[in-house]
Amino acid sequence: DIQMTQSPSTLSASVGDRVTITCRASQSISDWVAWYQQKPGKAPNLLIYRASSLKSGVPSRFSGSGSGTEFTLTISSLQPDDFASYYCQQYNSNFQTFGQGTKVEIK
Amino acid sequence: QLQLQESGPGVVKASETLSLTCSVSGDSISSDTSYWGWVRQPPGKGLEWIGSFYYSGTTYYNSSLKSRVAISVDTSKNHFSLRLSSVTAADTAVYYCARHLLGYCRNGVCNTGWFDPWGQGSLVTVSS
């Protein structure tokens, strides 16, 4: 199975900060990556698919980039509603895997 | 608006079989536009894909669970079910069902893609 190594596991930031989360795939997966946001006690919500396509309704401060083995999720200006956990997912094959998650905390 | 809702027992005894159902409204699980799947999350941990099916009957399972898991479909009720046998404490988790959108398609065959939307989740605790 393809492994997704996500970093950092925890990130402390302030409102207004630019935040970057990275996922590295164990082999090339083109741009078959999605990103999710999850708040405590809630189901994950899709933010980005195909590495850089923003889901309709998701704020434009969220963006994704990358191809091959390295992918990033960027929040251009962190807002109070963005303090949550974030997960990447690869779907290069029919046996998808998730990154370990990044918790974005208030600094 | 598409909605998914998990239902089933909140507690299952060790060595027994976990059974959950996902009821879907707002879309048909017989549609050719998406797969439908299950994902779980142990308390305080990350997400783990369990398995997904397509209307054609194609089903994929996580290799680490394949020997214990089965997904079944009831198109008349527009719901699908998960069965996980021989459970242990390691199977304690919140179980989510989700629409599993199509990924890339080649020669008329489409792979699995991203999950959207998700059900609210159902906590299942394995008791000893």
Image: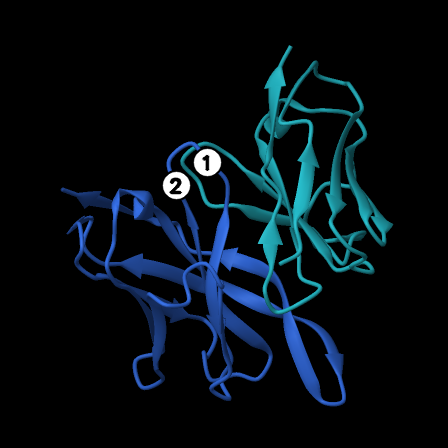
Chain colours: A cyan, B blue
Residue toward you, B57 or B26: B57
Residue at 51% x, 89% y: name it: B56
Q: Is residue B46 above or below residue A77?
A: below
Among the 4 quarters of the image, the one containing residue B29: bottom left
In the rendered image, residue B43, in percent from the top left (x then y), is placed at 37, 35
Q: Quadrant of the C terminus of chain B?
A: top left
Label 1, label 2: how far apart the Cα atoms are: 5 Å
Left or right: B122 in relation to B119: left
- The amino acid type of the residue labelled 1 equals Lys
Q: Could you tell me residue B113's position as x and y percent? A: 64, 65
The correct choice, above or below, for A81 with respect to B36 in the image is above
Q: Circle 2 marks a residue in which chain?
A: B
**Residue beneath disc 2:** B42
Residue at the image position 81 percent from the left and 50 percent from the top:
A69
- Residue ID at (71%, 64%): A92
Disc 1 designates what residue? B45
Contact? badges 1 and 2 (CB < 8 Å): yes
Please tell me whether mark 2 sits on a helix, a strand or a loop: loop
